[in-house]
Image: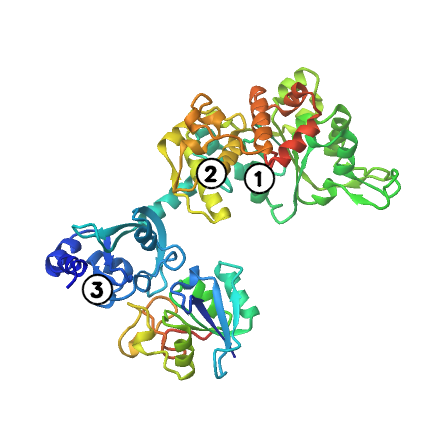
Amino acid sequence: MRLALSVHKGNISTVFDAASDLLIVDSSGEARAGGLSYRFVASDPAGRAAELKDQGVGALICGAISRPMETHIASRGIVLYPFVRGGVDEIIDAYRANRLDQANFFLPGCRRAGPGGQRRHRGGGCSPGRPGRGGRFRF
Amino acid sequence: MTDEKRGRSEFFSHPEGQSIILDSIADGVFTVDGQWRITSFNRAAEEITGVPRDEAIGQLCKDVLKADICEKSCCLRATMKTGKPVVGKQVYIIDAAGNKTPISISTAVLRDKKGRLLGAVETFRDISVEEDLRKEISSRYSFEDIISKNPQMIRLFDILPDIAEGGSTVLIEGESGTGKELVARAIHQLSPRRKQPFVAVNCGALPDTLLESELFGYKAGAFTDAKRDKPGRFQLAQNGTLFLDEAGELTPATQVKLLRVLQEKTYEPLGATESVAHNVRVIAATNKNLETEVREGRFREDLYYRINVFKISLPPLRERREDIPLLTDHFIGHFNLLQKKNIVGIEAEAMSVLMEYDWPGNIRELANIIERAFILCKGDFIERKHLPENISGAGDAACAVPARSLRDVEAQFLLSALRENNGNRALTARKLGIHKSTLYRRLKALGLGPGDG
């Protein structure tokens, strides 16, 4: 599966809606090497979701993301890990080791304590932790 | 401890007192040190961002605020670099629930008593209410793509859906640049034909023979070089709307043909032996007073009554000056989007210049002037010096913006000639000793032609 990360100067870009660059890697690969850089053409939610799908992206790790943007991307069957921060390499490592739910990878104010911390489709908190529960949606 | 550290220490040494003061402020306030880490964060900032103070302190401000500008055009960074404050910049932030909130931010540097840089402060205000209000007002003053709060235009907004619903021919009168094509498009969009084509043709831009083949098309062999059939605009607009701009420029011969087409609901392509039935709604527009043209024998009376089933008269911009600020604001937003700029507005002095000007080129001229100002304006606000000399006052040399190219000179000359002739292009062309189609071509090339504004 192809994993896309919204990046800015070696870090996860803080606001996905305003970001323009992606790094696309093989989610099961050993290293970041061989990752592809991609620059979005569209800035609107539908256009970005379509571009991600065209690039064969199955999962997206990004920073803060607006609800319409998230809905469009999730509706394309792409698994989202929103409100993440950190250096690109450490995030890829954390993703592969299933450690993305560590507190240091949350943007401030985006972590909810306990199992109630999962982000729901409309409203609620956010957490980049567990697939389908903590901060990402599968449709 | 160095002096600099001591200064910093003194500044941040009374957290309780500072906290009380900061928490009493309705605007969000936070301060950062030289590494962009948050050193104080007031209660309003917690409420607006949804980030508790204890989570915010010590974090990078971009991670806490989550604003669209944080990475590419950070205001705090610009302020720290230049020392100049940023005032009232509108951005948006995204909170943990994915809500986009518009905020207005201002920044300033923080220095100690000796003038040494300690960090910076950012204040911000949730402007959701103002934004909603602005959208509400803007929607009240806009109809399809037409923007106005002029009573005559508001009355037009009220009846436009009814005009659109019926299929009758409409005549739109108004000076050049008053938005005749926008109204025609609005009628088409509101009509049951909205999913069918809207085809526009400028009758004044083409010589008679070309116009006929343009409108009705031709058959292969109709004349030398007619190798294959060419569909006319009537065929292209089948089941839709045909917009005949500058209908007052039609020659008597074409007027006769058009009358027949409108009456019989059929037309004959050049070289065809049979008539073709059409189902096209015709909307005609002119910058002339067709009644006068009829009285003076330049326009056929029968055609006039055929197209004048419903007449819409668009007031010139000088008669709807209340719309100038509204339209200026609209064009600033339009060009900000188009040119990816962030010009906040226009200074009062420049606005008063726009309000006093006579606008012979109407809204198209206003759009062109704002577009021109965008090229010259490097700051947040359009100033008087960014407006053309002929508008901002020819006598005021300090404010004059010299023409930068031959193109500018030509544009200014043609606009000035048009102004002298009250926007009448045919008359302007005659006075300049050129053919009207040459004038149209030049205006179009300079971005001053129909549809360019």
Q: Nearer the viewer, mark 2 or mark 1?
A: 2
Dot 1 or dot 3: first in sequence order is 3
Element under disc 3: helix
Q: Is residue A134 left or right of residue B199?
A: left
Element under disc 2: helix
Q: Residue furthest front?
A: B2
Dot 3 or dot 2: first in sequence order is 3
Image: B62 above or below B365:
below
Mark 1 vs mark 3, CA separation in Å: 54 Å
Q: Which residue is identified by label 3?
A: B53
Q: Nearer the viewer, residue B212 or B94?
A: B94
Which picture quadrant has residue B18? bottom left
x then y, percent, for residue B306: 68, 28
**In the image, what residue type sits under mark 2?**
Leu
Element under disc 1: helix
Q: Nearer the viewer, mark 3 or mark 2?
A: 2
Q: Residues within 10 Å of mark 1 (few under 14, many from 20)?
A: many
Q: Which residue is identified by label 1?
A: B187
Which dot marks residue A94? none
Q: Which residue is identified by label 2?
A: B376
Q: Nearer the viewer, residue A129 or B138?
A: A129
Mark 3 vs mark 2, CA separation in Å: 43 Å
Q: Is residue B61 left or right of residue B176?
A: left
**In the image, what residue type sits under mark 1?**
Ile
